Amino acid sequence: MIEFPKEFENGNGHWSKRFIKWLKTIQLQYSTETDSLQLWIKEAERQCEILLEATKKIKDLSTSERYSKNIELIRSVPGIGLITGMILLVKIEEITRFENSDKLAGFIGLIPTCHSSGERDNKGEIIPRRHNSMRKTLIESSWIAARRDPALCLSFSKYCKRMEPNKAVTRIARKLVNRIFLF
């Protein structure tokens, strides 16, 4: 078992440069264990390099003529950063192809299912068909937006009084779609 130094015990700083440097100094009981640990460290460092390279390419794409104006607009929506903004812009392509925000929400998968029969109109969970990466991205952004934007924070609090937070954040994601569509 590996004993963590005091500065890493609380979980802060794991996978920082200092932490990786410390990991590289560990000598385990058997050389095969140490070799295995060193291979895992190299793999983690490679993954960080790949992530950094991908982030740089996304940043370059965001400054291109095609996306530079729209990325500024979409990033003004609370909870949406560079990566989320670029995911949305690339996947949506032209927002004008959607008649209204309901059509955009349907494309993303943030509308409720509807079971209608005669005069009865029952709405249920959100629809199963969706654009998976966009829906996940918007829901993750909604958690941040619900903390940062006063209006969304108030809405989130009201929703949480009558439903569980995971369902409430889906409603916040729908509000984000409305804001995105306005741009």
Image (cartoon, rainbow, N blue to C red):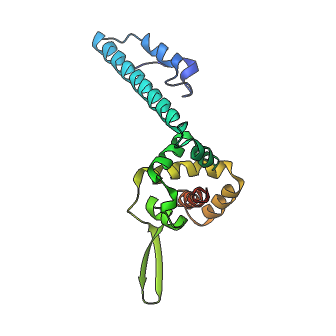
Q: In the picture provided, is 88 more to the left or to the right than 78?
A: left
- Please give the count of numbered marks on the rendered protein: 0
Which image quarter is the N terminus in? top left
Residue 55 at x, y = what percent? Answer: 49, 32
Name the outermost residue toward the bottom.
118
**Viewer-side residue, 26 vs 154:** 154
16 versus 73 height, above or below: above
**Viewer-side residue, 118 vs 2:** 118
Residue 52 at x, y = what percent? Answer: 47, 27
Name the outermost residue toward the left.
32
Name the outermost residue toward the front.
65
Residue 12 at x, y = what percent? Answer: 57, 27
* Residue at image point 36% right, 12% down: 28
176 versus 23 height, above or below: below
Q: In the picture provided, is 42 more to the left or to the right than 174?
A: left
Which image quarter is the C terminus in? bottom right
Quadrant in the rendering for residue 26 = top left
* Residue at image point 39% right, 10% down: 27
Quadrant in the rendering for residue 153 = bottom right
12 versus 97 height, above or below: above
Residue 125 at x, y = what percent? Answer: 45, 67
**Viewer-side residue, 64 vs 170:** 64
